[in-house]
Image (spheres, helix red, strand yellow):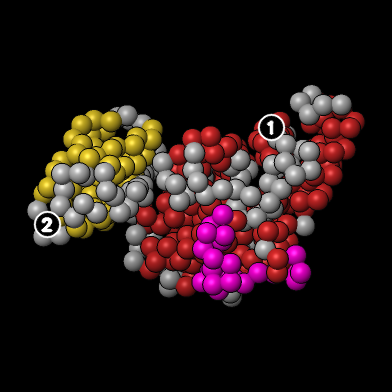
């Protein structure tokens, strides 16, 4: 069971156990564009290219956002009702009512995180916010891909319960990297999804069935090679898993296309006008991730993710009346993840707003001080 107490060691583990690895996630998100119908061709190539190039953004946030990691998995076989019936409730509040929120978060919230990303994408389409829609589509693609990786749907997520520790990275990263050029699959036409929640849970149930096949393949390859790190091991593992690995990744690309198409249709099928978003290389150059802890009593962290060339960044704090309280940051910053810490001890208790500005982009989040 993955504990919700986030130590440094756990953060590094979560970064290692990251869905399909960066190459797999990128391939899945890049390939989904070919599945979109002709009436969505306006989104190509700029908007869809962003989805592929930012397919692993959600993984990168794990180091700065303590709430991110549970969104990438669900240990569904820790639910007694799943063992008995093969199903769990799709309603988050219902699951929490029966098991407690601590238990639910500890098992992972992947299906509900996927639905939230879908709803956010739909809302962006409705208001024709193409920049932000690309961001949520990238997250949606990541969560959908995680839902098609069998080891993200089981409590034996790293083979630790069957003496196969390390299978997670051996499969999703090492194996996929070795055979990346052989992972080629056709594009399926995106279909409208009548019930998004049903759709998400259905593919989770289907993909869970590959857990045993994957673990058996690892046992076979280990026995044949006498180790888990040689060419012989990976050749044997690929021989046993190659076909269903390509199928899982193909289904992930198709599922992402289905959900993006459905969000677009439900939003009224808006048309993206020329130059509606920036080129992928500079789109979303600066992002203010989720502030933590919130509420804060001593120190608060403003996590920033910057892409592209060094750029001027300003972080300003405002009170409820709109008065500027402090300028936390006002300088040029380089690409990467930056955690900006701010002392709230001297602040009166209450609600404040943090605003990030960089170039033409701005973002604001609310936080609470408990002094």
How far is the residue under mark 2 from the one under mark 1? 51 Å
**Extreme residue toward the right, this view:** 224
Q: Looking at the picture, tell me which residue is in the foreground, 178 or 82.
A: 82
Q: Is residue 147 above or below residue 173?
A: below
Q: Looking at the picture, tell me which residue is in the foreground, 283 or 115.
A: 115
Is residue 60 at least partly visible in the picture?
no
Q: Nearer the viewer, mark 2 or mark 1?
A: 2
Relative placement, left or right, of 371 versus 290 is left
Magenta segment boundaries in residue numbering: 83-106
Point out residue 127 in the picture as x, y percentages from the top left corner: 34, 66
Identify the residue at image location x=89%, y=32%. 223
Identify the residue at image location x=75%, y=44%. 161
Point out residue 286 in the picture as x, y percentages from the top left corner: 32, 41
Provide the residue designation for mark 1: 174
Provide the residue designation for mark 2: 322
Identify the residue at image location x=76%, y=69%. 84
Magenta-drawn stretch, dominant element (helix, strand or loop): helix
């Amino acid at each position: 069971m993955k504990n919700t107490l986030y130590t440094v060691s756990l953060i590094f583990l979560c970064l290692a156990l990251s869905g399909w690895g960066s190459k797999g996630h990128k391939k899945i998100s890049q390939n989904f564009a070919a599945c979109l119908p002709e009436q969505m061709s306006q989104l190509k190539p700029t908007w869809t290219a962003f989805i592929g190039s930012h397919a692993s953004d959600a993984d990168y946030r794990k180091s700065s956002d303590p709430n991110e990691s549970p969104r990438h998995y669900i240990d569904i076989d820790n639910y007694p009702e799943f063992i008995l019936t093969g199903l769990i409730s799709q309603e988050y509040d219902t699951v929490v009512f029966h098991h407690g929120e601590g238990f639910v978060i500890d098992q992972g919230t992947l299906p509900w995180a996927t639905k939230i990303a879908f709803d956010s994408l739909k809302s962006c389409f409705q208001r024709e916010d193409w920049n932000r829609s690309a961001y949520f589509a990238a997250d949606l693609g990541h969560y959908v891909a995680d839902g098609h990786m069998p080891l993200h749907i089981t409590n034996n997520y790293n083979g630790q319960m069957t003496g196969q520790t390390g299978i997670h990275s051996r499969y999703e990263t090492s194996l996929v990297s070795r055979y990346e050029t052989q992972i080629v699959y056709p594009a399926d036409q995106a279909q409208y999804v009548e019930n998004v929640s049903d759709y998400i849970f259905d593919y989770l149930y289907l993909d869970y069935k590959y857990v045993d096949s994957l673990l058996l393949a690892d046992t076979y390859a280990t026995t044949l090679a006498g180790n888990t790190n040689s060419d012989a091991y990976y050749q044997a593992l690929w021989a046993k898993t190659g076909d269903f690995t390509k199928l899982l990744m193909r289904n992930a690309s198709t599922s992402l296309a289905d959900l993006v198409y459905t969000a677009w249709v439900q939003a009224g099928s808006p048309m993206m006008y020329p130059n509606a978003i920036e080129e992928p290389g500079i789109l979303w150059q600066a992002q203010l991730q989720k502030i933590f802890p919130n509420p804060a009593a001593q120190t608060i962290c403003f996590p920033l993710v910057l892409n592209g060339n060094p750029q001027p960044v300003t972080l300003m704090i405002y009170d409820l009346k709109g008065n500027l309280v402090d300028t936390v940051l006002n300088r040029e910053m380089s690409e990467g993840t930056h955690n900006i810490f701010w002392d709230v001890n001297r602040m009166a208790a209450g609600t404040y707003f943090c605003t990030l500005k960089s170039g033409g982009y701005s973002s604001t989040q609310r936080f609470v001080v408990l002094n």
